Image (spheres, grey):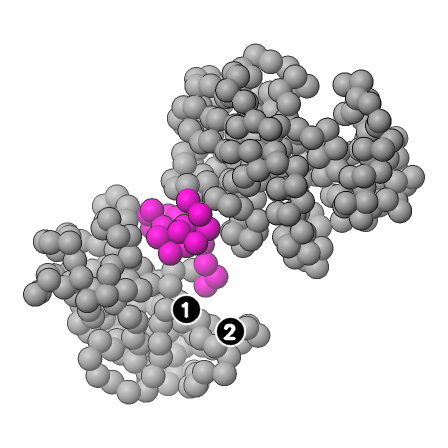
Amino acid sequence: MARLEIKSVSKTFGAARPADGLSLAVEPGEIVAVFGPSGSGKTVLLRMIAGMFEPDDGDILVGGRSVIGAPPERRGIGMAFQNFALFPHMTARDNIASGLRAKGGSDVAGRVAAISRLLKIEHVLGHAPRELSNGQKQRTALARALVGNPDVLLLDDPLRNVDAKLRYEMRLELPNLLRRGAAAVLYVTQDYREAMAIADRIAVLIDGRLAQVATPADIYAQPASVAVARLFGDPTINLAEVTPVAEHGALSAVIAGAKMRLGAGDGAAPGPCWLGVRPEDLAISSVSGEDAIPARILAITPMHEKAVLLLRLSDGTEWLAALPPDAPLGAADDAVFVRFAPEAAMLFDRATGLRIGPSHRLKAA
């Protein structure tokens, strides 16, 4: 199997620049999710790797060999699209086998049968696409991409059009299936949960640039910027404008009139910041005291595994808290006090949006 390497790749369409100096490497057997909002350049990146577009600048290497200028069929790449792209006049069996036959592969029937058993679609191989469910179409398209044992596998939001139950099941099954083939996998998705469930690393793409590449755990706990932090989490991260001060080696800031400890600093206090706290890191009580922000409950939304509280702080800022459903929640219009542990606070430069501090999240004081 081969390593995929993208080196300073750029692409422009008129005034739009969906790829702006992208550099990324994917090792054999590794799954990297390319995640970002609609229009961020995810599909353009896949199509440049596959050979549908050529980059304006930069290079793309598979196994150390540049594939720029090589036709798609000679790049050693398999691709599955979000719209399935099955040939309507062919059976599922023939759709899966089409790539192998075009390349003159051997034991086509045996390889199709093996991948079909793996994906649990052997019972529909004789069906035309119109006779398949969306889930069966998705697995047929995936089988076609996998059957040739490609060096690189590109998956363009392949679960977008399947029902919720199958999407959940495939999030559990796909990682093992993909690693079994040992290809370098790029998996495009707009669903952060899917990216976190499937990928070894996540490449966050925003406006044609990679904002952060890291493990799912690091992306969530240590976002590189406010923009990245906002893309992960449901409910989304809480933000407040603060100007931290340093006192006796620790940082603190005033939030809605309350002085909150932010943990140990690395020297002088930073300038104006965004302070970020995840909703699940908030605690709510009716008891005032140190490090407690006065607030009022505006609404409570039960969500089975958690309850989400919409809070209005005393300065009018609205925050969200995610609490266990069995926690004492209070009721709408109750006056409460909001707390968070100092190490839960994240600071971002207010001008650039970039995270402040080499430790990403602050250390406990």
Which element carries disc 1, helix, strand or loop?
Answer: helix
Q: Across the whole image, how many numbered discs are drawn on residues?
A: 2
When the figure is inspected, residue 38 is found, relative to residue 72, above or below; the finding is below
Q: Is residue 17 visible?
A: no
Residue in the picture at 31% in, 76% down: 338
Residue in the picture at 51% in, 33% down: 27
Q: Position of residue 276 (x, y in %)?
A: 31, 59
Task: Name the residue type under label 2.
Answer: Lys
How packed is label 1: few (under 14 Cα within 10 Å), some, or many (20 or more)? many
Closer to the chain start, of discs 1 and 2, is 1
Q: Are marks 1 and 2 in contact (CB under 8 Å)?
A: yes
How packed is label 2: few (under 14 Cα within 10 Å), some, or many (20 or more)? some
Pick the quarter of the image with the C terminus: bottom left
Residue sitting nearer the eye, 1 or 135: 1
Q: Which residue is mark 1?
A: 280
Horizontal side of residue 348 vs 17, given as left or right: left
Residue sitting nearer the eye, 173 or 302: 173
Which element carries disc 2, helix, strand or loop?
Answer: loop
Residue sitting nearer the eye, 89 or 126: 126
When the figure is inspected, residue 35 is found, relative to residue 341, above or below; the finding is above
Q: Is residue 220 magenta?
A: yes
Q: Is residue 28 visible?
A: yes
The span shown in magenta is: 214-235
Q: Which residue is mark 2?
A: 306
| Residue furthest out toward the right | 126
Q: Is residue 216 magenta?
A: yes
Task: Name the residue type under label 1.
Answer: Glu
When the figure is inspected, residue 175 is found, relative to residue 297, above or below; the finding is above
Horizontal side of residue 345 vs 105, given as left or right: left
Residue in the picture at 41% in, 36% down: 210
